Amino acid sequence: MKISFTINSAKVELELRPHETLLKVLRANGFTEVKSGCEEGECGACLVLLDGKPINSCQVLAMSVREKPVTTVRGIGTLHLPHVLQKTFARGGADQCGFCSPGMVVAAYGLLQRNPRPTREEIAEALDGNLCRCTGYVKIVEAVYQAAAEMQKEDTRTE
Amino acid sequence: MLPSTIQWYFPRRLNDAVKLIQKDGVILHGGGTKILEPQPRSSVKGLVDIGDLGLDYIRASGRSVRIGAAATFADVVRFAREKKRLNILGTSLSHAASTPLRNRITIGGSVKDFPMWSNLYAPLLALDARVVIAGMQLRICPIEEYAGSDLIHSRHLVKEIRVPERSDVVYGIKTFHVVRFEYPIFTIAAAVAMRKGVVREARIFITGVRRKFARLTSTEEVLHGNAITGRLIEEAAGKSSFSFVPDFRFSAEYKQRVARVYLKDLLREIKQAAA
């Protein structure tokens, strides 16, 4: 069946079956920036924002969220128009294999929307659902902290 | 895994949702995290989504807080931090699962489900919460009665949890887990009412035990009518008995020892908070 969703602020018709998770439906309909990791809600690779809040798309049935806005990492920033977070990740060495990075960026973005000046402890808490096997997390936390500082500077400049 | 032929229902009225779940094979869907656990679900024919029932509220009125069944763990943690209320509940739930999962796990679903590793039940039991149940009739039930009876297995919808707060009560909670956001091995929560330094009443519960929860009545009896001293704490903790199930991490005996230590720590914290 085809159901209308709002993905990255655009209305799209997605092909789905009623028992499928949001992760499966997104990937099957071309949103492959949402990564499939554990499919058990443990690794955070599949994170998207649902109504602005980070959720594991592997733990949500797509039909149940058909009327809520979904944001994937591509809705936060792209290769040609990267978000500040993506820039600080790349600059700061916060990605190695890159597989966890989309989920990390989504979690961090969700945090910065609620809390523009998080402490490092608050960043670590916000990323508690994201696993990384490569970096040891320190550079990831620093990248988010740096992004928050840069976003604060930009906001001060525009005021 | 769910069958591909499941039927979805999106009722807008509570009564409609209750009628739907009386059908065989039709179950409730809140956050959905329980439904997606890897276990056979071939008998599920329909899912009744509670998203349109308007149950995602948390309302403080006077000395009590009403939490709608569709409110998430994250909603309760945020409420507790911002309003500085329901602290033991907020503290316990802030350690449950992870940030993204807390954005989906619902209070109603977790009350109905009551897993062995629940972060939710110990504080609700200590707080003497009430469960508002929508079945064939609307009913309000103390959570201790709800969890300990066959009612929890009947076909109903949890509508709301009502949590009273008392100004004469000191609350405390301790959770034993290996890492911060792991499933708790056990949780002990206490609510102790005192007047002029003397214990008037106490509610002390532990979850994660063999029968899922237990009230530590022997400990409560030692405390009742007395001022909390170091000696009383030793005596009260000594009277406690726990029945744990051994697992791959810890023996039952080890869990009992740790539980006794945690109980003493909790009583010391309550004594300090009351001073």
Image (cartoon, coloured by chain):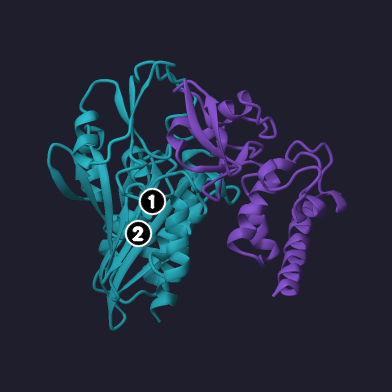
**The chain coloured purple in the image:** A
Q: Which mark is residue B118?
A: none
The residue under label 1 is: B71
Q: Residue B104: percent from the left, percent from the top?
A: 47, 44
User: Is A50 located above or below residue B4 in the figure?
Assistant: below
Quarter location, residue A102: top right
Tell me the residue at 62%/57% (across/down). A111
Tell me the residue at 24%/42% (across/down). B148
Quarter location, residue B194: bottom left
Q: Residue B26: percent from the left, percent from the top?
A: 29, 25
Looking at the image, is mark 1 or mark 2 earlier in the sequence? 2
| Residue A139 seen in the current view | yes
How many C-alpha atoms fall within 10 Å of the one at disc 2: few (<14), some, or many (≥20)?
A: many
Which amino acid is tagged 1?
A: Ala
Q: Is residue B217 left or right of residue A74?
A: left
How many C-alpha atoms fall within 10 Å of the one at disc 1: few (<14), some, or many (≥20)?
A: many
User: Is A23 located above or below residue B160 in the figure?
Assistant: above
Which amino acid is tagged 2?
A: Ile
Pick whichever, A85 or A93, lies toward us.
A85
Q: Secondary structure at mark 2?
A: strand
Q: Residue A55: percent from the left, percent from the top?
A: 55, 43
Pick whichever, B46 or B263, lies toward us.
B46
Query: In the figure, what tint was chain B given?
Result: cyan
Marks counted in the figure total 2
Q: Are marks 1 and 2 in contact (CB under 8 Å)?
A: yes
Tell me the residue at 44%/51% (across/down). B73
Q: Secondary structure at mark 1?
A: loop
Looking at the rendered image, the quarter that the C terminus of chain B falls into is bottom left
| Residue B263 seen in the current view | no
Q: Residue B58: percent from the left, percent from the top?
A: 35, 59
The residue under label 2 is: B58
